[in-house]
Image (cartoon, rainbow, N blue to C red):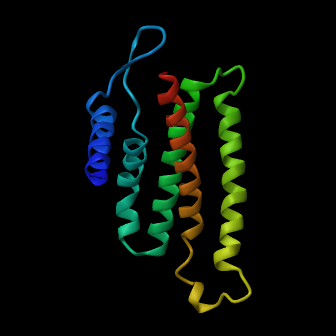
Amino acid sequence: MAKRTLIFALSLFTLSHWALPRAVAADGTTFEPISADALVKGCVVKSQPDFDTGVPTQMRAGGEKLIRCLEEIVLDQAAAMIDPAILSPADLRTYLDEIGTGYQKIYWLLYNENRKCGAACENRHVFHLGRHGALLERLIRDMVHERNEKKF
């Protein structure tokens, strides 16, 4: 009986969450929730062919393409959320560049320059880009969640 109740409750949640995609914002306007999955997937699709080559230089180009695309989404979401007098697009771009430089450097050292690295680390030259991409994806998901919760 408990299993049926759980399945029923999950079904209701799914229907209420997905079957009613539009909501009414506090100001009375219709709000269409944003899909973080769709935003991120668009970037993955653009960069996937480079990753699929298996060629390190192409894979690195794909990682850089993915990061630039994700950063553009962050910039777009921030523009919709934050008054540019408080956070200008140029300042946000600077912050994203600084985060990227430090984050990638730390992961590059972790995966490629540790004391036990040798020939075994030769195939790890794109891992730092993947970790940076994961950080940006988390930021996008947080931004979209906030926008969807506040309906703007």
Quarter holding residue 24: top left
Q: Tell me what residue is drawn at x 38 percent, y 49 percent.
A: 41
Q: Left or right: 6 with respect to 72?
A: left
- Image: 73 above or below 43: above
- Image: 92 above or below 60: above
The single residue placed furthest to the top in the displayed view is 28
Quarter holding residue 84: top right
- Image: 150 above or below 13: above
The single residue placed furthest to the front in the displayed view is 1
Viewer-nearest residue: 5 or 56:
5
Viewer-nearest residue: 130 or 9:
9
* Image x and y of residue 29, in percent: 40, 11
Quarter holding residue 96: top right
Q: Left or right: 47 with respect to 114?
A: left
* Image x and y of residue 111, in percent: 64, 76
Q: How many numbered tags mark residues here?
A: 0
Viewer-nearest residue: 2 or 62:
2
Viewer-nearest residue: 69 or 138:
138
Q: Tell me what residue is drawn at x 65 percent, y 39 percent.
A: 93
* Image x and y of residue 3, in percent: 29, 54
Q: Tell me what residue is drawn at x 71 percent, y 42 percent.
A: 95
